Image (cartoon, rainbow, N blue to C red):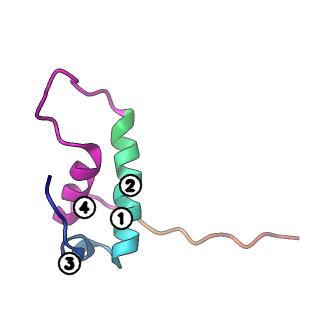
Amino acid sequence: MRVFTPNEVTAHAANKYLSVLVAAKFARVLNDFPRDRSLSGEKKLTTRALEELSAGDIEYRVIPKRKPTE
């Protein structure tokens, strides 16, 4: 298993916490797509998501929370 350093994942994100959240949400998106389960050497989705994030292949934007209206 590959180990990602904080410097690798924060190269294309604001901070390490945001980068982990982006990678986790992207891994959920990848989980929705059909996969070939016969491949034994297939990477885990979280590893694949972190690789794509550190390569700069994921585009995201932060949407601020709305304040509740009374």
Badge 4 density bin: few <14, some 14–19, many ≥20, Cα 10 Å: many
Residue identified by numbered label 4? 53
How far apart marks 2 and 3 lie (CA) works out to 18 Å
Give the mark nearest the N terminus, 3 or 1. Answer: 3
Q: Residue at x 19, y 57 (%)?
A: 51
How far apart marks 3 and 4 lie (CA) works out to 12 Å
Q: Is residue 42 magenta?
A: yes
How far apart marks 4 and 1 lie (CA) works out to 9 Å
Q: Is residue 29 left or right of residue 65?
A: left
In contact (CB < 8 Å): disc 2 and disc 1:
yes
Residue identified by numbered label 1? 20
Horizontal and vertical percent position of residue 41: 11, 34
- In the image, which is nearer the foreground, mark 4 or mark 1? 1
Disc 1 residue type (three-letter): Val
Give the mark nearest the N terminus, 2 or 3. Answer: 3
The image quarter in which residue 45 lies? top left
Q: Is residue 70 left or right of residue 12?
A: right
